[in-house]
Image (cartoon, grey):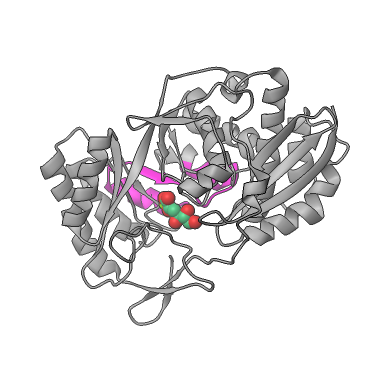
Amino acid sequence: MKIRDAYTIVTSPGRNFVTLKIVTDEGIYGIGDATLNGREMAVVAYLEEHVIPALIGRDPQRIEDIWHYLYRGAYWRRGPVTMSAIGAVDLALWDIKAKAAGMPLYQLLGGKSRERVMTYAHCTGKDIDACLEEVEAHVKQGYRAVRVQAGVPGIPTIYGVAKKEGERYEPADSDLPAEHVWSTEKYLNHVPKLFAAVRERFGDDLHVLHDVHHRLTPIEAARLGKAVEPYHLFWLEDCVPAENQEGFRLIRQHTTTPLAVGEVFNSIHDYRELLENQWIDYIRTPLAHGGGITHMRRVADLAGLYHVRTGFHGPTDLSPVCLGAAIHFDTWVPNFGIQEYMPHETVTDEVFPHDYRFEDGHFLVGETPGHGVDIDEAAAAKYPYRRASLPVNRLEDGTLWHW
Ligand SMILES: O=C(O)C(=O)C[C@H](O)[C@H](O)CO
Ligand SMILES: [Mg+2]
């Protein structure tokens, strides 16, 4: 088998997505997700200029060799653009291999380790009461786990909360980055009240998660982790920007609240100190950004040595292709924890037909050979790309902060 053709498809059904399609001389094709929110066209350029020309004529079954050719063979390694491009190729090649074998992807990975994949939903509200209503609605739908984010008095726009009532939360909401204002003091004083209210109304069994979205310093994160211990969170996510892995030593010294990290990581090397020192509890890198299945299963295996489990990133800015592949991975991986789930818009699902199903707070993997997600190219062509940027954050005095 040889790769005959490969091309990118950029479409915006509800939001921007980049898909890589790899076509073989035997008629089998595979698709991979190459979406990097707010940086879509950088990945397209990397694929078209540097990756696709080098793929033509290769044997698509040699996934390992192609991965190392694109990673080790490129003098300039790592980084979100490179690793998303490699991730897209890798997902497409696993799709081809599984189709050629006539197997759903999870079988090729090693078979089922579980019957269904637990997800967590996003529950948000302009204030605590509105957030509790969202939790109530999701619990009624069968969710066992919810991420709670509520507006903070005195902070006009905050991560995770829709700008207007009844609207969906979409972070990449403007042509150029919108400017938000952040106050650590207001946030830290308010947010423990949210978890207290959730536990009081919903009891102890519900899994409760929260995303700090990189905004604290290690000692502030330690304070928050300690303050919320009575509400036993499932995890506290991205409590600090994680370039300085050593910062987690300090957080860990102070709190037993479980920590999730890694949605902006793309390499096993980003995790090494965190895992080897047992400073974190969940890894978050999605397959599409972490060099695909070939690389992320190495990260998951390393994590497993330290009792760390997976909790893959699953926002709407990853396409159903990434989500579909993740559901196969989650069904197989021995140290699975949870899968994030933000439902895609109907129009997105129409462009990306898929066989995974959602039921009672869980995903059920499909049995179609491959990863079970396709792209309707005629439908995709109806939605042209439009530039959309993630916001930036400033402190109240104007200092640029982490978003
Ligand atoms: O889903 C999450 O946990 C996120 O933090 C979502 C990110 O803000 C989003 O994917 C950025 O593109
Ligand atoms: Mg997050």
Q: Looking at the figure, which quarter contains the C terminus?
A: bottom left
In this view, 6 is above or below 372: below
Q: Measured from the top left, where is residue 2 in percent x and y?
A: 85, 31
Question: With 399 as the anchor, is 8 left or right in this view?
Answer: right
Q: Could one spot residue 262 in this view of the protein? A: no
Residue 197 spot, x, y in % from top left:
14, 49
Judge whether residue 209 is colored magenta: no
124 displayed left or right of 295: left
Residue at the image point whose x is 60% and y is 25% from the top = 105
Q: Which image quadrant for residue 360?
A: top left
Q: Is residue 180 visible?
A: yes
Farthest residue, direction bottom = 397
Nearest the camera: 92 or 209?
92
Q: Residue at x 77, y 27 (%)?
A: 61
Q: Is residue 56 left or right of residue 92?
A: right
Magenta-span inclusion, residue 270: yes
Query: Which residue is the extreme one toward the right?
Result: 57
Find residue 372 and report its horizontal and vertical position in percent: 59, 30
Image quarter where the N terminus lies is: top right
Q: Position of residue 155 (x, y in %)?
A: 27, 71
Q: Magenta residues, as a range?
A: 245-274
* Residue closer to the observer: 85 or 230: 85
